[in-house]
Image (cartoon, rainbow, N blue to C red):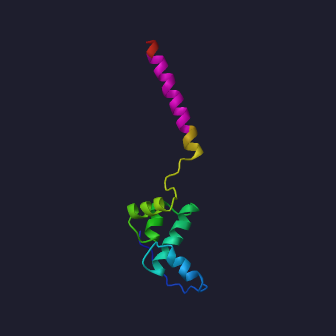
Amino acid sequence: MSAEKVKVDLNISNDLIPLIEDLGLSKSLDGNIKISIAIALFTSRSVSLARAAEIAEMELADFMTLLKNKNISWNEYTEDEFRLDKIAVKDFKDELGESRND
């Protein structure tokens, strides 16, 4: 999914430039900013993992590695998924119990 690009003139304080460059996410300031935006959008659940990688202009696997290196989880196990798994395990155990009685 390639979206139309819009050039944005961004005014930021000079003291932020070294901080952004020190992130070491990209070789360029522009790349560091794009990746930072992608991470922020992903961690706020505004975009999917795949979309965040596109925004960062990175391959999905590389973006996943970047997140891992930054200790940002890219695979979340939600409470709903846990609840559904507990039900599935209980059902499975119940089935095993019934089949042992056959």
Instruction: Residue 41: give x, y in percent of width and height.
Output: 55, 66
Name the residue at 38% across, 61% down.
Answer: 61
Relative to 25, 17 lies left or right: right
Give the residue displayed 56% in from the left and 67% down from the top: 40
Prevailing secondary structure class for the magenta stretch in the rendered image:
helix
Query: Does 78 sit above or below residue 65?
Result: above
Percent of width and height locating residue 59: 38, 66
Q: Could you tell whether 11 is left or right of 59 in the image?
A: right
* Viewer can see residue 5: no
* Front position in the image: 77 or 98: 77
Q: Relative to 3, is 51 above or below?
A: above
Task: Identify the magenta region.
Answer: 84-99
Q: Is residue 18 above or below residue 61?
A: below
Q: Locate residue 3: give its quadrant.
A: bottom left
Q: Where residue 102 sits in the image (x, y, percent)? A: 43, 12
Camera-side residue: 24 or 29? Answer: 24
The reply to whether residue 57 is in sight is: yes
Q: Quadrant of the N terminus?
A: bottom left
Q: Residue at x 55, y 87 (%)?
A: 9
Magenta highlight on residue 10: no
Residue shown at 53% from the left, 47% from the top? 77
Front position in the image: 37 or 5: 37
* Residue 54 position by quadrant: bottom left
